[in-house]
Image (tube, rainbow, N blue to C red):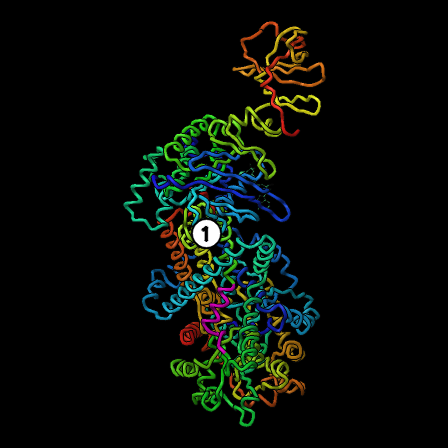
């Protein structure tokens, strides 16, 4: 017992019940999914073997990954400039922008999705206006295709990209930037050699956050994709609820889980994850 | 299948509730199941009062009110039992999950007849007691061992009169002919109806559709893929027409009236070759109210209930005794009305119950 | 560093900084010699950092002009001024090693790598951090970080080095040590140092000249000795060291406590004034005695601890004596 006490901080005992509960609530369903993926409809790795047999599954996965990557690149890039602008404008404008950003979290994804239809749809505001001033003869197909899905997803994801970036930019000491200039670095040198590296943890956090959230996107691709952009989350839900192929659904869910874990593992080889998730830099 | 979505989409709270309803419940059940927390304990409150009422599992919103007034009042009057609702939407996967979790909290699910075919033999449903429920009060072939059709809805299409005013499209062949009728189309995303329409367009007779020739149907679907959008919910189908995104759109026929009204008559419903879908009441295995569920279904078959459902929800009667009593102004939009009944074709729930899952996946593979 | 021989003098003319209607720095005129160690001393908020930032180029000047060796630099951006700067808190680049920090100025000037390495090694030797080249700033002590900041600022041989309270974060003992190292480095490289502090002892011990600032203006400029011995104003006298103030008619004199002698007993002919001891405080190297004079003033006297041990006690009557030269007439009160 004493030997144990030496190794286990008594603080753990206090949170142990909570820990056990969290483990049960998280691990339970995850194990359940893993179990399903190798038992339904029959024991074995048949569900995983489908990946090799079915072009459809591979195509859905590829569509998902492709859309998520594009979404992540654009959301994080745009999010970076927005966060940068917020950091460097006047306090009043900053508060204003922050309010707008937070408000956007409160607007339901459906409202935001359908707003895009009203704005960029075939008879949406933009197309009608462009046609009226004679710039285009036929409406531009912004929506009901992959472009539409990307617009909707990027728009939804930008606030998520901004927040971690804002946090890491806020942590930067202005004097460090001054020091760089004082030592003779130009604006772009200072940005590339000081600002960018110092905001890298924020960039990584925001990239991971956006990418992982994008993987689970469901409503936006379903609505803005016109039915032709099928992503994994929607496919899983169809297999669960409509076609009753729970094994396939569980296999895809497990695949996404492992994919995300693998990504985190790769990241952790390059940098301390605790830095990314807000831990101290040392 | 998700066909029943249209019921709750007559409501204002539409898609969000739909999404939340189904995800939250699922997550919740999964968590309970996996963490070993007994569902019975969690839901004991619901279960114990079950003896004096029947729980109807439907899509919420307006259907709650309509099922209450059209069926519930008469049911209570004759049996003394009340009617309660679970409005989370009885998708096939959810019924299966409820029964397998061992805690059945619903008595009658407002589902599709093909659900009875796929879930019945696997032991997820109670057989229909035809000593209480009548086989004669529905269409022939729609009274199955594990479910009986209580209402009908259908797949028809609307077209833009401004685009095709002088020479309007008449049938599915015209619908699929984008050379003669240029413009965008919309089809149902979960295969149902879309496959039948494609086959009819390709020349298959309405009474010779089943078993569906999948390759032929998908080839036809593919032939207009570039000109097609696919909707997953009734409101989406509606907005694709109202917003002018498509010149011809497959719709649930009972939405035709709304679309005609919302476009001031610019879009017009075509019921020719409409595919009649049997909406069915099915009973999850081990339902809490037991035999009372059968009495409830029997009540819903009666002519007054049938007409009340048409009036309140736009669902077409499936009891032939009610066909003749469909009011004048409802006739164009009710597929079993005198003016439509000879032009329609009938869905085969057995084929869909047995092949639906694969058909949906093959269809998704084709359109995505 | 030989190329610095003829550069590094600064001329400040009427330099003024307004923040809105607030004058943070007010018409400062100052000539700084090349190679000089000049200290800006003043209470918090007196405009020291603001003035330094204008010299560095981070703040625009509202009026006036700043010239380097006679040529105006008011319109030269910070990154082109080539002034080294040690920031309050050091502002080291946390993601770079000590070596990269120190070599940064050369590397942004695209100097060849071998040249950078040689120079960085030289700098690290100057600040005695040869063994720490590959550490990150967070792995260094406060004093070591301070030296990295210094090496980084000096690496490109700037004609002028600006230091904003560089020792503020260090404890007293380390501070004295680093003060000496700084002084030593200054002597060796001959760069003009402009040093901001509000620690008067630091100012006195290190500077060639001290500028006392008050509310954005220069109160007095001079060598440490001049300022201590001949303070021009009551503010200067009381900010740099302790001082008694004696009024005679319209004139006010400043009188340092250590320049007063004290004798037990009253009524000596040579006594300037007399009074009774109110308190005696022991400071180890000396004792501070507060005397209430017959005129109702209060005068502090610092005397050696070994004197008059037994006779000195609270309530004792004493005479106070000082030489004429000890009382400095102030220009203003
Ligand atoms: N950006 C600014 N806007 C408005 N007022 C400012 C600004 N920067 C400084 N001030 C004001 O100018 C005055 C001088 O500030 P400064 O920082 O130069 O003081 P300091 O002498 O360096 O003080 P400390 O010893 O506390 O560092 C202060 O009253 C300060 O409030
Ligand atoms: Mg300061």
Q: Nearer the viewer, residue C161 or C68?
A: C68
One can see residue B297 in this view: yes
Where residue A95 appears, x then y in whole percent? 60, 54
Indicate the quadrant containing the C terminus of chain C: top left, top right, bottom left or bottom right.
Answer: top right
Image point (59%, 77%), residue name: B150
Q: Position of residue C295 (x, y in %)?
A: 72, 16
Q: Residue at x 38, y 57 (%)?
A: A259
Q: What is the x, y in percent for residue B258? A: 62, 80
Q: Quadrant of the N terminus of chain C?
A: top left
Kindly tell me whether residue B234 is visible in this rendering.
no
**Residue A217 located within the stretch drawn in magenta:** no
In the rendered structure, the answer to whether residue A184 lies left or right of residue B300 reads left
Q: Is residue C185 above or below residue B202?
A: above
Residue that sits furthest to the bottom in the current view: B166
Q: Nearer the viewer, residue C227 or B109?
A: C227
Q: Is C243 situated above or below A248?
A: above
Residue stretch rendered in magenta on the structure: A140-155
Say which of B67 and C293 sits in front: C293
By secondary structure, the bulk of the magenta-drawn segment is best described as helix
SS of the residue at dot 1?
helix
Q: Alpha-carbon neighbours of circle 1 within 10 Å: few (<14), some, or many (≥20)?
A: many
Which residue is under mark 1?
Answer: A202
How far across and down, in percent of the image, does residue C285 sit? 52, 15
Which image quarter has ligand 1?
Answer: top right
């Amino acid at each position: 017992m004493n030997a144990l006490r030496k190794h286990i901080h008594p603080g753990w005992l206090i949170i142990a019940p909570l820990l056990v509960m969290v483990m049960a609530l998280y691990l339970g369903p995850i194990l359940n999914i893993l179990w399903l993926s190798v038992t339904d409809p029959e024991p074995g790795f048949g569900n995983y073997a489908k990946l090799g047999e079915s072009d459809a599954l591979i195509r859905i996965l590829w569509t998902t990954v492709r859309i998520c990557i594009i979404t992540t690149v654009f959301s994080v890039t745009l999010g970076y400039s927005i966060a940068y602008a917020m950091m460097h404008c006047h306090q009043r404008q900053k508060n204003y922008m922050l309010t707008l950003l937070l408000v956007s979290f409160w607007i339901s994804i459906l409202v935001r999705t359908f707003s895009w239809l009203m704005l960029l749809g075939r008879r949406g505001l933009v197309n009608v206006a462009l046609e009226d001033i004679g710039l285009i003869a036929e409406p531009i197909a912004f929506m009901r295709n992959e472009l539409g899905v990307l617009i909707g997803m990027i728009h939804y994801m930008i606030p998520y990209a901004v927040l971690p970036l804002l946090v890491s930019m806020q942590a930067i000491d202005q004097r460090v930037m001054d020091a760089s200039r004082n030592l003779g670095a130009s604006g772009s040198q200072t940005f590339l050699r000081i600002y960018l590296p110092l905001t890298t943890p924020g960039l990584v956090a925001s990239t991971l956050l956006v990418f992982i959230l994008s993987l689970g996107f469901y409503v936006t691709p379903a609505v803005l994709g016109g039915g032709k952009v099928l992503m994994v989350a929607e496919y899983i839900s169809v297999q669960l609820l409509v076609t009753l192929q729970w094994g396939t659904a569980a296999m895809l869910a497990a695949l996404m889980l492992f994919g995300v874990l693998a990504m985190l593992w790769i990241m952790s080889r390059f940098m301390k994850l605790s830095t990314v998730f807000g831990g101290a830099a040392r | 299948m998700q066909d029943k979505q249209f019921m709750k989409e007559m409501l204002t709270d539409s898609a969000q509730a739909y999404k939340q309803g189904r995800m939250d419940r699922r997550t919740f059940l999964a968590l309970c199941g996996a963490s070993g927390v007994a569902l019975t304990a969690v839901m004991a409150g619901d279960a114990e009062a079950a003896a004096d009422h029947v729980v109807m599992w439907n899509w919420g919103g307006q259907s709650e009110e309509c099922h209450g007034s059209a069926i519930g009042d008469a049911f209570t009057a004759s049996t003394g039992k009340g009617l309660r609702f679970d409005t989370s939407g009885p998708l096939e996967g959810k019924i299966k999950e409820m029964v397998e979790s061992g805690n059945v909290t619903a008595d009658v699910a407002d589902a599709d007849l093909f659900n009875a075919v796929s879930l019945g033999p696997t032991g997820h449903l109670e057989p229909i007691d035809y000593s209480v429920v009548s086989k004669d009060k529905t269409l022939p072939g729609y009274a199955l061992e594990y479910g009986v059709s209580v209402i009908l809805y259908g797949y028809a299409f609307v077209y833009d009169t401004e685009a095709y005013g002088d020479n309007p499209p008449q049938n599915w062949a015209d619908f699929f002919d984008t050379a003669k009728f240029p413009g965008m189309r919309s089809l149902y995303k979960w295969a149902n109806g879309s496959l039948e329409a494609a086959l009819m367009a390709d020349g298959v007779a309405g009474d010779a559709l089943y078993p569906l020739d999948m390759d032929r149907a998908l080839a036809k679907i593919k032939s207009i893929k570039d000109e097609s959008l696919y909707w997953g919910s009734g409101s989406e189908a509606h907005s694709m027409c109202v917003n002018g995104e498509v010149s011809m759109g497959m719709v649930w026929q009972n939405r035709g009236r709304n679309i005609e009204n919302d476009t001031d008559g610019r879009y017009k419903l075509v019921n020719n070759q409409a595919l009649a879908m049997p909406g069915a009441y099915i009973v999850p295995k081990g339902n809490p109210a037991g035999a009372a569920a059968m009495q409830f279904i029997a009540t819903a078959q009666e002519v007054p209930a049938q007409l009340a459902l048409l009036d309140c929800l736009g669902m077409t009667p499936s009891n032939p005794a009610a066909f003749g009593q469909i009011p004048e102004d409802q006739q164009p939009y009710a597929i079993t009305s005198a003016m439509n009944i000879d032009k329609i074709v009938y869905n085969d729930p057995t084929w869909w119950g047995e092949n639906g899952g694969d058909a949906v996946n093959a269809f998704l593979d084709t359109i995505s | 560093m030989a190329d610095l021989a003829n550069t590094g003098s600064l001329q400040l003319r009427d330099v003024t900084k307004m923040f809105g209607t607030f004058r943070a720095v007010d018409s400062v005129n100052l000539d700084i010699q090349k190679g000089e160690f000049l200290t800006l001393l003043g209470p918090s908020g007196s405009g020291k950092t603001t003035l330094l930032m204008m010299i560095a180029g981070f703040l625009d000047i509202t009026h006036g002009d700043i010239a380097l060796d006679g040529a105006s630099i008011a319109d030269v951006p910070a990154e082109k001024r080539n002034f080294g700067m040690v920031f309050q808190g050091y502002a080291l680049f946390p993601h770079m090693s000590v070596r990269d920090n120190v070599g940064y100025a050369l590397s942004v000037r695209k100097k060849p790598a071998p040249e950078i390495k040689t120079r960085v090694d030289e700098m690290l030797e100057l600040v005695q951090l040869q063994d720490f080249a590959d550490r990150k700033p967070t792995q260094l002590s406060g004093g070591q970080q301070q030296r990295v900041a210094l090496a980084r600022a000096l690496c490109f041989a700037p004609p002028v080095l600006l230091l904003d309270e560089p020792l503020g974060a260090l404890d007293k003992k380390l501070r004295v040590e680093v003060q000496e190292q700084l002084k030593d480095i200054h002597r060796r490289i001959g760069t003009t140092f402009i040093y901001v502090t509000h620690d008067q002892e630091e100012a006195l011990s290190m500077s060639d000249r001290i500028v006392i600032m008050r509310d954005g203006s220069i109160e007095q400029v001079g060598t440490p000795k001049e300022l201590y011995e001949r303070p021009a104003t009551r503010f200067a006298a009381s900010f740099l060291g302790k001082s008694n103030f004696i009024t005679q008619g319209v004139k006010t004199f400043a009188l340092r406590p250590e320049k007063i002698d004290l004798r037990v007993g009253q009524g000596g002919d040579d006594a300037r004034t007399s009074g009774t001891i109110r308190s005696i405080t022991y400071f180890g190297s000396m004792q501070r005695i507060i005397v209430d004079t017959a005129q109702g003033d209060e005068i502090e006297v610092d005397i050696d601890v070994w004197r008059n041990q037994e006779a000195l006690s609270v309530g004792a009557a004493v005479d106070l004596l000082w030489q004429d030269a000890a009382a400095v007439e102030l220009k203003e009160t």
